[in-house]
Amino acid sequence: MAQLNLYIPDELEEKIREKAQKEGKSISAFVADLVNENISPTEWTKDFVATFGAWEGEFPEIIALPMEKRERIE
């Protein structure tokens, strides 16, 4: 597992500590979850739903598709 060093304002650190403690998580687990939710979302964001609010029915599930090999176009 990789280790990262981050520089954040003291006020933000305190908020992170408080939220992590409320959720019963270590700071590392809490921050990793936040980053993972941002990078690999499992549901559509509120902004997406608001933008495409005229959609009728259920939104399809988000799935991670494998990378596909493409031919180079020159």
Image (cartoon, helix red, strand yellow):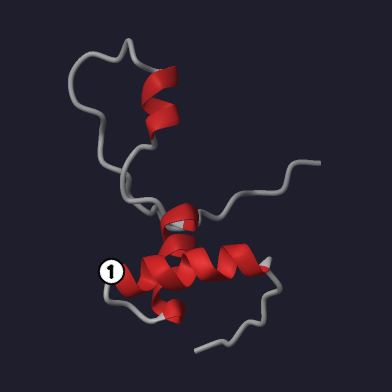
Q: Is residue 28 above or below residue 22?
A: below
Q: Is residue 32 visible?
A: no
Which residue lies at the image location 29% right of the left edge and 15% below the top edge? Answer: 55
- Could you tell me which residue is drawn at 22 percent across and 13 percent down? 56
Instruction: Please say whether residue 48 is visible from this viewpoint.
Output: yes
Q: As displayed, is residue 5 above or below residue 52?
A: below
* Residue at (32, 77) in percent of width and height: 25
Quarter location, residue 10: bottom right
| Residue at the extreme top | 54
Given residues 13 and 30, the one toward you in this image is: 13
Residue type (three-letter) at the residue carrying disc 1? Glu
Q: Residue furthest left?
A: 57
Total count of labels: 1
Give the residue number, with chain letter if any, for mark 1: 23
Place of residue 40 in the rendered image (x, y in percent of width and height, measured from the top left): 43, 56
Place residue 60 in its image quadrant: top left
Question: On the rendered image, what quadrant is the C terminus found in?
Answer: top right
Residue 43 appears in which quarter of the rendering? Answer: top left
Compared across the picture, whether 43 is left or right of 12 comes to left
Image x and y of residue 22, in percent? 29, 68
Q: SS of the residue at dot 1?
A: loop
* Residue 63 percent across, percent down from the top left: 32, 49
